[in-house]
Image (cartoon, rainbow, N blue to C red):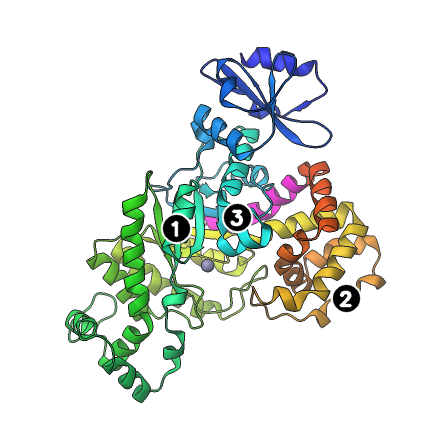
Amino acid sequence: MKETLKKILAKTDLFVYENSVDEAEGTACAMVRNSNEKLLAVAGPKADLFKGSLENGFLLCPLTNENAEALQTLFPYTRPKSHKGHAFTMGLGDRLGLATPGHIRALRGHDIYPVFAQQSIRELNLTHRTFRDVISAASFNVFQEGYKSGFGADGDHLKTKDEIKYALESGCTMVTLDCSEKINTKAAKFTDDEVNAAYSELPRDVREHYENTYLGKDLPILGRVDEPELRRFVIVFWKAVDHAIECYKYIDEIKTVDVDFELSIDETLTITTPAEHFIIGNELHNAGITPISCAPHFTGQFEKGIEYAGNLTAFERDFRVHQEIAEHFGYKLSLHSGSDKFAVFSTVARVTKGNVHVKTAGTNWLEAMRVVSEVDPSLYRKAHKYAIEHRPEAEKYYHVSTNVSEIPDIDLQNDAYLPEYLNLPASRQTIHIAYGLLLENEWFRKEFFRCMFENEDLYYAFLERHIGKHIRMLTSD
Ligand code: ZN
């Protein structure tokens, strides 16, 4: 059937993605494109799973969520799966639904299990997408490339049971639970007297539980935890710990496939101390829970889209202790905001021995803007100015420390200079956090997606180079 479909398609003016053509149950599918959009061509008895228009000898189907589901049914490798058992796993968030082929090319030759579908609720809101949209895009892209080694789908930074339900019902195979709203961040800055006062107001059983478990005990890795430290931990974290345990049990109740559970405490104001990480890990352990990974807030600045800022020796010291704790409880560390943090990758690779989860996202959008800066200077100029003008709005969603005054005036630059803006930290961050605001504008959206459609190979090449650089540094000894 594969050959038949190829022959039929050769008589049309559709472009056929060679690597996509595949068949199952006597039914052949191929990813194709005309001058406006990508489509799925289907021929064979199972074509009735799909919805499309009947052409001469085949069905031509739009890339809808329904057709993605049909594709997943026919070709199970296009459906996301748990990444349990894979040492090195990597989140490759794709806010545009266009990046996965580039990621697949970057991964070639490496033993890395990718999580191609990875979005937070914040990202979904800013891009007006659903989890199903994100997973469907990953499925079509995986099919386009003929990639059959499996991928995951991460509901990233989920905060409530409702969000977990939404993610799992949409097909996510990973839940990254973000407990930040249950963490009493104010209490981290309390004086000892304030800690004592707040502590004495906690439910008695909570206090007794923590005191009996930790005070006067010789704990692995930590040694002893003293009373003031424990009290502070409890008032800051006890609700977050309870929430994590509740959410884990909830996932267990409602899941229909294997789900990877990650606990993230990275979006907090303070860095995670070893004692905090240990007690959280131990509480989960005592509740019978082993997450697949945990993301502490490591020392130093992990800002969006730019290099790590901080003391690398301190980072390695800190990271080693967290690794010891993770190993003790049987999970791996997860590094969030991993985009462009090249300076820490050697340490991450060395200390974890390649048993780690690393998340990237925004850098893939920046590579898309690099394409625009090279092939459509006038669109880039408009978008650049818009991003600078609207940066205060974008800063509501993301914390960044660069200043727009550091960005060279674009009106003084010729077109050849434009890609350079994607290398300078201040303009990188400005473009980075503006994705939602830009994509909301019809003028940008239309021209941008047209540009990306016409230059997909250039985008893949940029991603292969840029994500490839991440992978090289994360996998070398
Ligand atoms: Zn995070």
The CA span between labels 2 and 1 is: 43 Å
Query: Which residue does the numbered mark 1 point to in the structure image?
Result: 164
Magenta part of the chain: 459-477
In the rendered structure, are the residues bearing label 1 and label 3 in contact, judged by CB atoms less than 8 Å apart?
A: no
Q: Is residue 385 visible?
A: yes
Quadrant of residue 303 within the rendered picture? bottom right
Secondary structure at numbered mark 1: helix
Secondary structure at numbered mark 3: loop
Residue 276: x and y in percent read: 31, 69
Identify the amino acid type marked 3. Gly
Apparent side of residue 119 relative to residue 287 in the rendered image (left or right) = right
In primary-sequence order, the first of circles 2 and 1 is 1
* Residue 49 versus residue 85 in the image, above or below: above
Query: Which residue does the numbered mark 3 point to in the structure image?
Result: 93
Residue 329: x and y in percent read: 26, 56
Q: Between label 3 and label 2, give the one nearer the viewer.
A: 3
Q: Between label 1 and label 3, give the one nearer the viewer.
A: 1
Bin the neighbour count of mark 1 within 10 Å (Cα to Cα): few under 14, some 14-19, many 20 and up.
Answer: many
Work out whether residue 79 or residue 441 is closer to the camera in this orientation and state it. Answer: 441
Query: Which residue does the numbered mark 2 point to in the structure image?
Result: 408
Apparent side of residue 373 relative to residue 269 in the rendered image (left or right) = right
Identify the amino acid type marked 1. Ile
Apparent side of residue 28 relative to residue 328 in the rendered image (left or right) = right
The CA span between labels 3 and 2 is: 29 Å
Residue 267: x and y in percent read: 45, 65
